[in-house]
Image: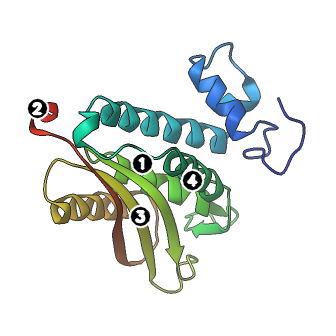
């Protein structure tokens, strides 16, 4: 454990390296400061998804596929950690005038990331909300993804866009003007690897 450093995740006192080691140990022994911290849980979930995609890429034929750059993986995890910070509070309506409800920008980014990552062969690299998410004006969601090329790129981007839009409509009150998807990395698998 690292005491109160600027690199700790969600004020838990644990760094990305600490969380990675915790995930590698199968989250045992349990650490309450990590298990009860929403930002730590979001980072662990993202790390698990990154690990699953990395294993899929490593199983592909190395000679015929571009290798996964170690810097790419490191920058992806750094981006995920930075974006999961709580950020601005986004108000939610309430039927009780004495109750004030909100969701953090970090929670919305994780919702977007989870929706995008749910598309087979896709990993969300970065996500940003453009505009004022207080509900007074429409916002745009900008996402950069990495894909394993198993079907047409436009099809993958459209599926990510649909899932993200659907989840945001279901779980937030944001007015979404657009969900912009940029494909940053493409990893190619051979016919034998697919199946």
Report how far apart the C-alphas of labels 3 and 1 lie in the structure.
13 Å
Reading the image, the residue beneath label 3 is: 144
Task: Name the residue at 30% across, 52% down.
Answer: 147
Mark 2 or 4: the one toward you: 2
Image location (x, y in percent) of residue 177: 37, 81
Query: Pointers 4 and 1 in contact (CB under 8 A)?
Result: no
Residue 97: % across, % down:
65, 68
CA distance for labels 3 and 4: 13 Å
Alpha carbons under labels 2 and 4: distance apart:
30 Å
Mark earlier in primary sequence (4, 1): 4
Give the residue number, with chain letter if any, for mark 1.
114
At 22% from the left and 41% from the top, the residue drawn is 64
Give the vertical position of 180 relative to 101 (above or below): below
Residue lying at the far bottom in this picture: please name it: 137
- Residue indicated by mark 2: 192
Residue 137: image location, x then y, percent: 49, 86
- CB of mark 3 within 8 Å of CB of mark 4? no
């Amino acid at each position: 454990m690292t005491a109160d450093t600027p690199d700790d995740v969600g004020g838990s006192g644990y760094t990305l390296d600490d969380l990675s080691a915790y995930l590698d140990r199968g989250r045992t022994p349990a650490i309450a400061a990590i298990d009860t911290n929403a930002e730590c849980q979001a980072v662990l979930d993202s790390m698990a998804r990154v690990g699953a995609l990395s294993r899929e890429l490593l199983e592909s034929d190395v000679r015929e596929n571009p290798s996964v750059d170690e810097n790419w993986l490191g920058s992806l995890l750094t981006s995920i950690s930075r974006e999961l910070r709580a950020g601005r509070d986004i108000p939610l309506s309430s039927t009780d005038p004495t109750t004030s409800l909100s969701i953090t920008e970090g929670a919305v980014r994780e919702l977007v990331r989870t929706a995008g990552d749910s598309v087979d062969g896709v990993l969300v690299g970065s996500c940003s909300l453009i505009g004022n998410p207080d509900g007074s004006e429409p916002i745009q969601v900008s996402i950069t993804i990495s894909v394993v090329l198993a079907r047409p790129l436009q099809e993958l981007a459209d599926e990510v866009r649909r899932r993200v839009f659907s989840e945001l409509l279901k779980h937030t009150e944001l007015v979404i003007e657009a969900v912009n998807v940029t494909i940053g990395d493409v990893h190619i698998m051979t016919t034998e690897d697919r199946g």
